[in-house]
Image (cartoon, coloured by chain):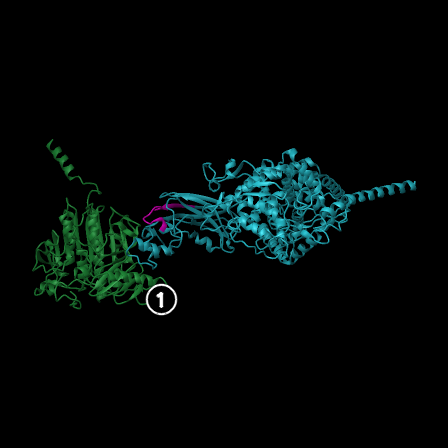
Chain colours: A cyan, B green
Amino acid sequence: MRILLLIIILSVSGSLAMAADRNEAVLRPFLNSYCIRCHGPKSQKADRRFDQLSSKAANTNEAELLQEILDQLNLAAMPPEDEKQPSDAELKRVVARLTTILEKTREEARINVGKVVLRRLNRAEYRNTIRDLFRLRMVDFDPTTTFPADDSTEGFDNVGEGLVTSDYLLRNYLEAARKVADKSILPGPRPQMIHYQTGFKTGADSPQEVLSGVSLDKEGRKEAGHMMIKFRQPLGLPLLDKKRGVPADGEYVIRFSAKAVRRKSRYKDEDLRYNSNEPMRLSVSIDSRELGATAHRIIGEYEIPDDKVVEIEHRVWLEKGFTFHVHWANGPNGSFKRILRKVLPKYNKDALYPIRNPPEMYVGSGPELHVLTLGIDGPFYDQWPPAGFARFFPEPPKKPDVTYLDESLMRVASAAFRRPVSSDEMEPYLNLTQQYFAEHDDFWAAAKYGVRAILTSPNFLYLAEGTPSDSKVRKVNGHELATRLSYFLWSSLPDDSLRAAADRGELGDPRVLRRHVERMLADPKSSALTENFTGQWLGLRKLGEMPPDPETNRAYYDENLEDAMREETRRYFLHILNENRSILEFVDSDYTFVNPALARHYGLSQTFLDERFARVSLSPEDHRGGLLGHASILTATSNGVESQPVVRGVWILENLLGTPPNPPPPDVEPIEPDTRGVSTIRQLMEKHRNNPTCFECHRKIDPLGLAMENFDHVGAWRSQYGKRLPVDPSGELPDGTNIAGAGGIKKFLLDRPEQFTRCLTEKLMIYALGRSLSFTDRGDIDRIVSTAPQYKYGLREIIQQIVASEAFQSK
Amino acid sequence: MKSSLTLLIALVVGAPATAAEERPNIIFIMVDDMGRDWVSCYGAKHQTPNIDRLAEQGVRYETAWCTPICTPTRVTILTGQYPFRHGWTQHYDVPRWGGDGLSWAKFTTFARVLRDSGYSTAISGKWQINDLRKQPEALKHHGFDEHCVWTGAEAGHPETEERFWNGHIMTNGQRSTVSYGPDTINTFVIDFVKRQKRKPFLVYYPMLLTHGPHVSTPLNHDNPPEGKEALYAGNVTYMDRLVGKLIQAVDDAGLRKNTLIVFTGDNGSASSGMLNKEPYPKGKGRKADWGVHVPFIVRAPFLSDGGRVSRDLIDFTDLYPTFLELAKVTPPDDLKFDGKSFAPSLRGSVDPFEKRSWIYSQLGEFRMVRDWHHILDSEGNFHDLGKDPRQEQEVSPLDKIAPGRRQRLQMILDRFPKSAEPVRSKYSAGSQGPAS
């Protein structure tokens, strides 16, 4: 018996040893022949060194390194083309060997390496969680404005490694919790409605004062029955401003009537800095005196007819303390003072230049926007008490007691911690709150206190997952899975339906899980996925950081191109997501979404019925199609003055190819090459590339960026620079492929679709898991990539696959 | 048959044309020596119910200027020119001191233009700018078909001194002594108005009240009050009554809709009144805003609704072009207007280009100009009349806008030419003479 065991053990370990020997036998000579010279004791290019590497992958670092070697060989990026190349047979053998080694290592590591991730909510997630927890409208209420920005790791700001909690942030959490508790705990009766109105007063007791035809009262133009907006000043209700805004959160109705007078007048448009051909437009904004300019938001714009009174009602949710104003959005630009000083003397010889002539000499002669009545009513509610309050404090008794307090707080905690809570666990919170209640004898103050404690608990602030009970069973439980899922798709906590499914333990059934994913993707809250994922994957959050020069890029500003660009990419992603289109359409397609302004920018010939976005078909002559044609990305990868081939090249490597270059070495001397006689950016870059150290990485970056040179700094197509220099979009990639223009890049990507698929899948994984990937996740990724052709690379299906993957469901 | 044909013809002939085709009747009432500080609808303490009613039915102008004394004001009205142009820069009592008076060869009054265009015209009240003994046809030459005037005190004829009790009144050439001058004159106007059947009419009614000597009126004759101010107050009350009578007569005759009534004063008050609960300085003859800032009420139902208060600027050179515009008369080419018609303002026009941005007044070589808020005169005084109506304070140096306004007013002031040669050597700056 024992001898048999010994033989078995010996043979197993022998085979293991033989296996190990076989690995070494294949790997070692290969590394020595083709790699060690640049990655060994004499030189460590790109900080990589292989001579001390064993094929046993003793730790994660070694495993990562082996994985890197494998990747580079697969990409044919290494050895560099001017070095000795292995034969095809050698290459195949080594690649197969490395693949096997790594698979085995992954298996083992899964068992050994602990991966409990503690990641806190980032700013957006905190905001959304509060919104959904207390059913608040977070449009103008944002308790996170003073939170520090979250750091990005691997390009995403929801990755746990980068999310530090400082004491500054903690103080912010305490303050935010206070604000949230005040906002959501609203006992007491429905707030009284206000009705402020200013309008045209006629009456025997108040004879009209007529000054140049404009009725005034002694307070001047603002509260007369017949108000007039001079230029772009705001006009509001003084009573509302005096009372420091509306008295309570709620829905309000703003009513006003207005009329455009003398749209065309004796004054020339250029004198008034005004376009008399446009109908007059009145915009409504909401403002907060307390919060200042940051709270100012335009909520609507209306066209006002000439010489006819139009009555308008606008419904809006207002937070307590907010007021509203109306503005003449396209009125004469510039100050009234300028008109009185510089324009009037051109038209009236009794006016003196350059003094500030009396306004009575101007009022009644130029264009004016008359606001005849202005008023506000509200607040209106669909239900009272509000839903967010009622769910935790249902039907509060007349004299609420400790029992009710405890029950309510348990309800809050269960929702906030995203899992059932036990009374033992909640004991410290309840004791704290009871003590407060006893001391202050104010039930609601104590309730708020308790809520604040819950909102500053790590169980709320962190997506806390328990340590696995068994080193072999690493699956997340139902609540943890629901939480991961909702933060992936919604950047917020699970809704009632998902939570109920988790409570009932249904999420273990893959079909149930799939249905929830479908449901959640169809829910409007999935806009968080579009916003946050594409904003970071495609670098769109950078759009607007380096805006182009207003003098020479009028259309960018006049036609709001920046917003249109963003909208195009958003709609494109949303379309591919909603229709489960192939992700290869991110690379190239024959359609996109534009509005008339953007269509003009792209030089498309479609006609539009109105100003809205529409899907348009693209032909090859349009040079668009896929993300590489989107002006949003092209502008975000420029510096506002010129296109930047290096930035674009790096962008393509990072976001489409998935092979980001190494950062530039810190010890590189600044280059001062001889750049005389250079006329294009291509030539300039070539002069810089002659240095071999730089060339290593730049031979991968530059060809891609230069191929994009047909797109200028705002994404418009050009076939030449300036007047005479033609754009040369040709290039040669490290593996020898020749590309011409963006089309060449697209073809290159489409020829090897698994590369882009892997890139996008990895990005989605990082975002979904909230941690950087390690080689142990390769199994899932490889599987998703290899099965993608079966479902035609559909994006929705990829997301389903990610949710179903082992990585997503393990910890 | 014949009677019905006659009736038909009478109906056709006598049928009134529509108001739009008709030219409006014009009644221009000017009180003597009374400013806003005695008219209740302007904020005075003294009650003037009939004038107030007129304001409720028409437009009350807050900012109207005449000149500080009667003669320059009247010549300005009649010629439509500023004193520096017509030469009558000072008070000059022609009947008392002699001289040629207002020359009809040199000047065409608005009455003459209107009469020549088909109006029936009359003047009732005080003329005093021609000697009617030496020039009995003067009023006709100046354009008035009929007249009922106090001739002014003629040198060498003591009976002509009286204008109130036992007043010396000349009606269409006939001189007589009447019980109480203002009554006779008022009755004449009402009678004239009632008599006009076929042509539009113009009445120029420069009232004798409330000029001195301040004596009792038929209302308080039995128990006259004591002291100048009380007597003056009594005069104001009686004047208000007379104005009320005239307006009533116009309305009773069915002429209300198509009659323009202008009510104003010829210079500041002869006795200090109260304005907005504060004492207001006596205005007559004074070189300041309160010397020329008079009430100005216009009732024109065919143009404007009642109950309006306007801050549009008006001075007395505007009356002539306004009358002509409303009467639909094109002025002859050689007529030079210094003013601007205020018909657009009456119509409610909001366009400042159709209205004035400054008004001007003059007494001798003293000149002043103002806009809606500020006044500037040739002696260098500059005041913010909104904050400082009695021109007592310097404009604050913290007021950054005022210096610019001053510059503009100076520009306007600098435009005006030197005064024309006075009519007679005796009539020159500095000779004021006793108040007539």
Dot 1 lies on which element? loop
In the picture, residue B370 is in which quadrant?
bottom left
* Count of numbered badges drawn on the protein: 1
A40 or B127: nearer the viewer: A40
Chain letter of the residue beneath label 1 in the structure image: B
A653 or A485: nearer the viewer: A653
Q: Is residue B55 left or right of residue A97?
A: left
Q: Is residue A389 visible?
A: no
Examine the rendered structure and indicate whether residue B233 appears above or below residue A655. Answer: below
Residue A345 in the image: state x and y as whole percent: 31, 55
Residue B353 in the image: state x and y as whole percent: 29, 52
Q: Is residue A765 left or right of residue B42?
A: right
The C terminus of chain A is located in which quarter?
Answer: top right
- Residue at the outermost top position: B1
Residue A268 is inside the magenta segment: yes
In the picture, residue B435 is in which quadrant?
bottom left
Q: Is residue B92 visible?
A: yes
A89 or B236: nearer the viewer: A89
Residue B231 is inside the magenta segment: no
Q: Residues within 10 Å of mark 1 (few under 14, many from 20)?
A: few
Q: Is residue A348 left or right of residue A625?
A: left
The N terminus of chain A is located in which quarter?
Answer: top right
A240 or B377: nearer the viewer: B377
Kind of residue at disc 1: Ser
Q: Which residues are magenta?
A: A256-270
Examine the rendered structure and indicate whether residue B388 appears above or below residue A302. Answer: below
Residue A98 in the image: state x and y as whole percent: 74, 43
Residue A358 in the image: state x and y as whole percent: 33, 57
According to the image, label 1 marks what residue?
B396
